[in-house]
Image: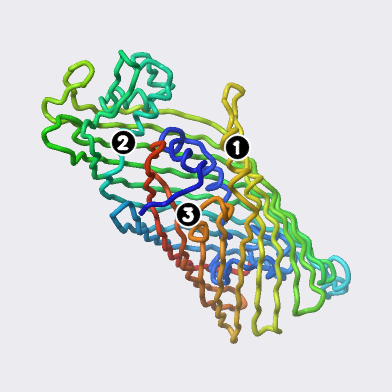
Amino acid sequence: MKKRLFTTAIGLCLCLIVHAQNDLDAIRYSFKEVGGNARTQSMGGAIGALGSDISVMGINPAGLGLSRKSEFSMSLGFYNIKTDAEYINGLNTEQEFNFNIPNIGFKLTTINMSKGKPVEDGWSSFTFGMNVNRTNNFNSNSYYGGDNKENSITDFFTQYNSASGTHPLDYNNESEPLRYLAYNSYLVDYDETNDVFSSSILSPNTDVTQIGSISKRGNTNEYNIAFGANHSNKIYLGMGFNLQSVNHSMKKSFTEINNGQDSIRDMSSLEYTHNITTSGIGAGLNLGIIFRPVNYLRFGVSYQSPKVLHLKDKFDFGLKSEFDLNAVDPYTNVPKENFSGEEKDFEYTYKVITPSRITGSLALQYKKRGMLTADIEMVDYTTTRMEKKESADPGFALENRTLKDNYRKAMNYRIGGELNSGMYRFRAGYSYQASPYKDNAIAFNEKLARKSVSFGIGLADKDYNLDIGYTISKWADYSSPYSVEGQETYFVTNNRKAGLLQVTLGLNI
């Protein structure tokens, strides 16, 4: 499938195959799911004004002020993701299953008493809580393939080496690892007389079969410490401190088979690999307030501050090439030999400043029979920034300009409901996570939005609660193995469908 992105994104496809850090990394670690226990997931994550629930620490810590009891809870998650990958004329399906602990935490509530009765006028109660929420699950597999009659990845290598300004014999495998590999694997030929690079494919008409895979693993977690207070059962205040951990790895493999004329002795096949692992941590604050003018109505507002993520990338490159028998360099007549090489153990440290989040919440409660909840969240992705860690680094001027020009303020929506019948709870919800791109910056913007439908059941007793929730999410993402200036760019369309089954056990303590 052919897709046309905005001009800057085409340029970034070149960065994706060469460098480890770009604006897509910044957005990846700025994106955040609500996370939380089975009840939260079942209600679409719309818990900003719900209160009491341990998961609320990640959205509006003022919800802790509504707590009337101490509790410990733990969740088990079973995550399955299916990816339909389209590339040129090919369609392939891959699945990935993951077991994890998406949420664990506790809260300790103290009720103020006066003359043996709870205080109703003044500070009524205080709650301290800690929890861990999984806010991103990166696990996925994508396998794609198709026949390309427009260009070859060797054309990319040729353009990339041409832009070096360095004689091929002077390539440094530390500062220019990919140029070094492309030249020494004979995939790029060099005419020293005319100072011109050319592709190792000599056929006048390109005809190659391209096969690739992308395997992602890892997650982001939030570690929350929060405090909530209740004033006269009308105003609830909360403040929290949180740490975000990043653990992400990606393995890319790209194979190309030359289907050109048998009479031409040139490249037979190649395999390019690129592996990258990112780890890091950052910190931020959560502030919130909930106002309950009457018993059945609650309004909430919360602010999640930006986080400064200190990240380290470890990456490597690999390149293999095979040639037809009797293939020679067209400029030197030197026979071409099969090649296999790797350049490993590259590291780079940098910072990503994630955007802040402002959430407005509403909850309607009908006695003890049930409730309806809704959240609207604003995230300004244009404020996302990347910064160098060392003074000798060139910085991220291009990436930050891209973040400013092509991303936007996004509005996310979450709605949920709960119906109570004795000990039993029945829940459903929906959430919409908007694309971070501007509408005029990308042709298929709406397909990048993540839409989720959820439902669940629960059992509540005076000593414990048991909840089960299931969430189905759909979205798409796009990537390009490479891009050649002035020629058609083919994109891999990854249509994702994920299911999360979550079970939470809560114990009153």
Q: In terms of depth relative to the viewer, which is nearer, 274 or 410?
A: 410
Mark 3 residue element:
strand
Disc 3 to disc 1, C-alpha distance: 22 Å
* Residues marked 3 and 1 touching at CB (< 8 Å): no
Q: Is residue 173 left or right of residue 104?
A: left
Q: Residue at x 73, y 57 (%)?
A: 227
User: Which quarter of the image is occupied by the C terminus?
Assistant: bottom right
Disc 2 to disc 1, C-alpha distance: 28 Å
x then y, percent, for residue 305: 70, 49
User: In the image, what residue type sits under mark 3?
Assistant: Asn
Mark 3 vs mark 1: give the one in front.
1
x then y, percent, for residue 86: 34, 55
User: Which quarter of the image is occupied by the N terminus?
Assistant: bottom left
Q: Residue 272, labelled with which disc?
A: 2
User: In the image, what residue type sits under mark 2?
Assistant: Tyr
Q: Earlier in the sequence, mark 2 or mark 1?
A: 2
Q: Residue 137, labelled with which disc?
A: 3
Mark 2 residue element:
strand
Q: Quadrant of residue 507?
A: bottom right
Residue indicated by mark 1: 386
Q: Is residue 170 left or right of residue 110?
A: left
Q: In terms of depth relative to the viewer, which is nearer, 47 or 165?
A: 165
User: In the image, what residue type sits under mark 1?
Assistant: Met
Q: Residues within 10 Å of mark 3 (few under 14, many from 20)?
A: many
Q: Residues within 10 Å of mark 2 (few under 14, many from 20)?
A: many
Q: Quick check: 57 above or below 505?
A: above
x then y, percent, for residue 395: 59, 29
Q: In terms of depth relative to the viewer, which is nearer, 173 or 486?
A: 486
* Residues marked 2 and 1 touching at CB (< 8 Å): no
